[in-house]
């Protein structure tokens, strides 16, 4: 299949799925109400109908948030797998998501005693800082003065170690926390899109779009890296600079996304692989297609999370794993996919 | 084209290249021979810019190698190395296109695609251009790498003379392809006289047949350097490799 037709197919499916996702949930919203909600908010008139308000203030930001977070996680996965030349890498591997989880857990347990309170921005801020701190930690600890060789491998191993450290920190906080706090920590670690609101959404969209455009610039260099660090250097790629830039893009994109919706696993791992099975591993294709498929996967998962136990809601991280893992394994076994 | 001046390379107190000076001419195939650990590969890496000399300078057309950026260098200097693996599946033509990466920003231009086609044709990999690189045999993979590296320096870029370095690219290839690929390098240099080839090969017969000059390295130093007939004598080979030979045979 040509990459253009893949793009068109993804776009079509994404629009379709978003519309379905915006319509169904705990409350079903009629087409008329959706139409009215759009026209009213475009005209700037106040919305009085309850379903219209649910659509504009809850459903719509949630659907769009899902799409952008999915895009961010999938592109993060593409970038990290390419940078580490390793198919098992997830975007959170360099410590980002465990750090964010630790930051969030700290907020849940100690937040009430802190003087600083930024309202609904406090939790995302704590998570984001946690993610950035742990990743910086990983980056500095993996820099060895003695040898520059295979520094990427040492980064990977340091990431695994620091991840374990921060996750045990989360474990400790859950252990000392009171029950409702511990539940909040658990729930946050499984991810949810239910808290999405427009201000957060603008922020996530801005960061994701900028990072996505930036990462497209490094697609060629990441391709060259498939030949190995040495060969990439001979093709004019400065490995050190590439590493710093790509890590920075990934950390900002993933920690911001994680900060607002919690830890959502597996999307960053499977989306790049699904695309490689479909159309090969050219990063110039994987980055934009990853953004689209990531958005698709998370939108679908969110819809399932709302419908499976309706009117109750499943944490989305559970859905991405329960549905994603079997599909992924079946595909891995069926295609003669080399990695 | 390439001049190395008193180049020394030391790592952890161990001298790998000791005070080597030489000049390599344009339009010639210059091959380096020597026993294991004599510093051949290190010397190639010093000329390619992968390693920085502890002392001395490498000059490319009178310009110090250290002053040329990685990106600039990639436009006119290419290195053929031993067999390469890819970390992810990629089609053959995508691998070959990587050779053109230093020459375009964003999307590949028509000229880049045309060069890839020609290069794939030269190394007989055109019919496998849509195959997954990871499914190829060792010899096929190496031919694809030849096509990639030649695509990188297929034509003059900004009027700079080109440099091709060989870091034992014939290892693991059978006799037919060893000669076949050396012949192609020879033919390419004949029609592109601005090209300089400096390389390491293991086989003395191949070195004798295809080189214009030979550098013999022993214990990190130059043992002898000059025309193949003058350098590859029974006496020199015995002293460097500790192997007695009667007379070199030649293959047509």
Image (cartoon, coloured by chain):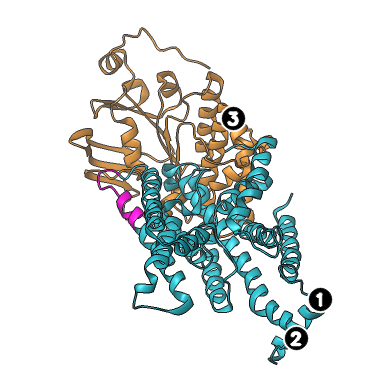
Chain colours: A cyan, B orange
Q: Residues within 10 Å of mark 2 (few under 14, many from 20)?
A: few
Farthest residue toward the bottom? A45
State how far apart marks 1 and 2 are (Cα): 12 Å
For mark 2, name the chain: A
Q: Marks 1 and 2: which is nearer the front?
A: 1
Q: Which residue is under mark 2?
A: A39
Q: Which residue is mark 3?
A: B140
Asked if residue A108 is among those painted magenta in the image, a careful observer would answer no
Looking at the picture, tell me which residue is in the foreground, A337 or B126.
A337
Give the Cα distance between marks 2 and 3.
62 Å
Image quadrant containing the C terminus of chain A: top right
* Disc 1 residue crowd, few under 14, some 14–19, many 20+, Cα 10 Å: few
Which of pointers 3 and 1 indicates the residue nearer the eye?
1
Please indicate, yes or no, whether residue B41 appears anywhere in the rendered image: yes
Q: Which of the two labelled residues, at mark 1 and mark 2, occupies the earlier sequence position? A: 1
Camera-nearest residue between B182 and A328:
A328
Label 1 sits on residue:
A31
When asked about the image quadrant of residue A126, the answer is bottom left
In x, y percent, where is residue B8? 22, 39
User: Furthest residue to the top?
Assistant: B246
**Which label is found at residue A11?**
none
């Amino acid at each position: 299949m040509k990459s253009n037709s893949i793009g068109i197919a993804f776009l079509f499916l994404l629009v379709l799925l978003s519309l379905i996702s915006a319509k169904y949930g705990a409350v079903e919203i009629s087409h008329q109400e959706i139409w009215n909600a759009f026209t009213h908010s475009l005209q700037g008139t106040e919305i009085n109908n309850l379903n219209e308000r649910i659509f504009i203030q809850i459903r719509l930001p949630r659907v769009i948030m899902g799409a952008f977070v999915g895009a961010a996680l999938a592109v993060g996965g593409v970038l990290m797998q390419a940078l580490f030349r390793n198919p098992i890498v997830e975007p959170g591997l360099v410590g980002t998501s465990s750090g964010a989880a630790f930051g969030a857990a700290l907020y849940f347990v100690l937040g009430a005693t802190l003087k600083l309170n930024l309202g609904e921005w406090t939790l995302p801020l704590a998570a984001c800082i946690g993610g950035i701190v742990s990743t910086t930690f990983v980056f500095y600890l993996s820099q060895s003065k003695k040898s520059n060789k295979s520094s990427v491998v040492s980064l990977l191993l340091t990431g695994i170690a620091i991840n374990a450290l921060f996750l045990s920190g989360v474990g400790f906080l859950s252990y000392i926390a009171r029950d409702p706090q511990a539940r909040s920590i658990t729930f946050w670690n499984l991810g949810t899109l239910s808290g999405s609101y427009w201000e957060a959404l603008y922020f996530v969209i801005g960061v994701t779009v900028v990072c996505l455009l930036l990462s497209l610039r490094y697609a060629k260099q990441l391709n060259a890296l498939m030949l190995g660090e040495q060969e990439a250097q001979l093709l004019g790629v400065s490995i050190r600079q590439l590493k710093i830039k790509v890590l920075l893009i990934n950390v900002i994109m993933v920690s911001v996304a994680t900060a607002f919706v919690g830890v959502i696993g597996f999307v960053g791992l499977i989306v790049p692989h699904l695309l490689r099975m479909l159309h090969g591993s050219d990063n110039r294709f994987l980055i934009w297609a990853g953004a689209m498929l990531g958005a698709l996967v998370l939108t679908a998962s969110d819809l399932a999370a709302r419908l499976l136990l309706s009117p109750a809601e499943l944490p989305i991280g559970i859905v991405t794993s329960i549905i994603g893992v079997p599909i992924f394994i079946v595909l891995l076994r069926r295609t003669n996919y080399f990695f | 084209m390439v001049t190395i001046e008193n180049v020394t390379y030391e790592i952890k107190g161990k001298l790998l290249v000791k005070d080597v000076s030489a000049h390599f001419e344009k339009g010639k195939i210059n091959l380096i021979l020597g026993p294991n650990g004599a510093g051949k590969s290190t010397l190639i890496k010093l000329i390619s810019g992968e390693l920085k000399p502890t002392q001395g300078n490498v000059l490319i057309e009178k310009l110090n190698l250290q002053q040329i950026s990685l990106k600039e260098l990639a436009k006119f200097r290419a290195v053929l190395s031993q067999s390469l693996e890819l970390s992810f599946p990629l089609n053959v033509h995508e691998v070959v296109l990587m050779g053109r990466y230093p020459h375009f920003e964003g999307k590949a231009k028509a000229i880049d695609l045309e060069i890839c086609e020609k290069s794939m044709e030269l190394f007989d990999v055109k019919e496998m251009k849509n195959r997954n690189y990871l499914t190829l045999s060792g010899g096929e993979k190496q031919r694809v790498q030849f096509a990639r590296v030649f695509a990188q320096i297929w034509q003059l870029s900004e009027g700079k003379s080109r440099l091709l370095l060989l870091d034992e690219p014939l290892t693991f290839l059978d006799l037919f392809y060893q000669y076949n690929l050396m012949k192609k390098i020879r033919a390419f240099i004949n029609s592109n006289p601005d090209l300089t080839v400096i390389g390491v090969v293991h086989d003395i017969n191949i070195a004798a047949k295809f080189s214009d000059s030979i550098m013999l390295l022993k214990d990190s130093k130059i043992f002898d350097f000059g025309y193949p007939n003058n350098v590859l004598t029974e006496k020199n080979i015995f002293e460097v490799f500790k192997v007695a030979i009667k007379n070199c045979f030649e293959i047509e």
